[in-house]
Each structure stands twice: as C-alpha cells, then as structure tokens.
Amino acid sequence: MQPSVLPDLAHNDSRAMHWLATAAAVFATVAVAGLLQPGDGAASASAAPAGTAAPHVSTAEAPDPTGVVFPLVCGSVGQSVGRQARGDLDGDGKPETVVAVHCAAGSGTPPDAVYVLTHGSGAAPRVVATLVDPALRLTVGELAVENAVVSATTLGYSSDQVPSCCPDQREETTWRWSGGAFVRSVARADAGV
C-alpha cells in the first residue's frame, strides 16, 4: 500500500464525540432558524403590494372537498382531488373552493375536471359550476384564486393522436363570476409545449 502524500488531518477521525457535537450543532441551527421564521400573519401581510392591505379571506368557512362526490364518471377506481384554491368568487363574503379532480387511475395521465364548490343550504358542500369538463382531456398544472378570479394553467392535446403522456398545448385561462355565470377568457395559449 502506498503512503498518502496528504497530511494526517485530525478532524478526519470519526469518534462518537465528534458525531454528537455535529448533531448538536445541526439541531441548534435548525431550532434557531425555526424561531426566526415569520408567523402566518406576517407572511400573508408581506405578500400584499406596498401600500395596500392584504385581503382577508377566511378559508375556515370555505367548503372542504373531502367526501364530495363529483359529477365525474370513474367506475370502480374512484375520484382523486388534486389542486385546490379558495376565495370569494361571487362577492357574497363567503369563500368558495375550486378543485381539480380526476379519476384515481393507477397509471397514465387521467384528465382533470375543475369544479366550484359552495356550501349548500345545509353544511354539506355542493358543486355549483364546472369550469373544465373532463371530456376536454386537459391536465391542470396550476390553480389559484385571486381577487375573485380563478386562474388555471392547463395542458392539452392538438389531436387524438397525441399520446396522453405528452401534452403539446398549454393555456393560461381565467374565469370571473359575471351576470350569474363564470365567464372564461384565455390569457395565453401556446402550441408545441
């Protein structure tokens, strides 16, 4: 065996005391970093542009999609709720929940449907609108509600010959409640994604 030309470094010795000291230092760093993080109120207030107050939307009242049976035919595989966004869409002071839902297929890319939930006459949430029909074969990438506008990034296909794995079209779409219905507008459409 050839002797090393490098100097013998004392800190290369991995004794139990060395590992305990390292673990204690890492733990102390994480603990201090956790104490220095802003609370939820500070984070949402800093997200508002300078000079404006952050809008207060109570997500506690927004409908919970857990247990809702959506108008999506999935057979025996069941339904899976993906992305969610909450906000007051119709200006009544009560937030709605917008959800992307697809069939819980074991593989592949099942298409998404996007539904708007509100509280029914009782406490149970109910679907009041379909923003994206699953027959369109779209996948929802991003979903948000801001200033009473629903926005979504959807990925789709230019023809039936495009495989489900590889969408080749992308749209930035918004919906706004107006005149008793959701009005859709496409902000940007890109082909050849």
Image (cartoon, helix red, strand yellow):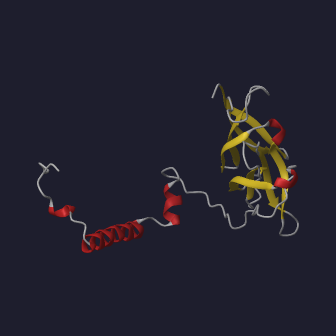
Q: Residue furthest front?
A: 1
Q: Is residue 74 left or right of residue 14?
A: right
Q: Nearer the viewer, residue 187 or 190?
A: 190
Q: Nearer the viewer, residue 191 or 50?
A: 191
Total residue callouts: 0
Task: Work out whether 101 lies above or below 160.
Answer: below
- Percent of width and height locating residue 156: 72, 33
- Percent of width and height locating residue 97: 74, 56
Task: Work out whether 134 lies above or below 43.
Answer: above
Residue 133 seen in render: no
Q: Is residue 80 left or right of residue 144?
A: right
Q: Quadrant of residue 124?
A: bottom right
- Quadrant placement of the C terminus: top right
- Percent of width and height locating residue 131: 79, 44
Q: Nearer the viewer, residue 143 or 23?
A: 23
Residue 14 seen in render: yes
Q: Quadrant of residue 38?
A: bottom left
- Percent of width and height locating residue 2: 15, 48
Q: Quadrant of residue 158?
A: top right
- Give the residue displayed 52% in from the left and 65% down from the top: 41
- Give the residue displayed 15% in from the left and 63% down from the top: 10
Q: Is residue 41 left or right of residue 24?
A: right
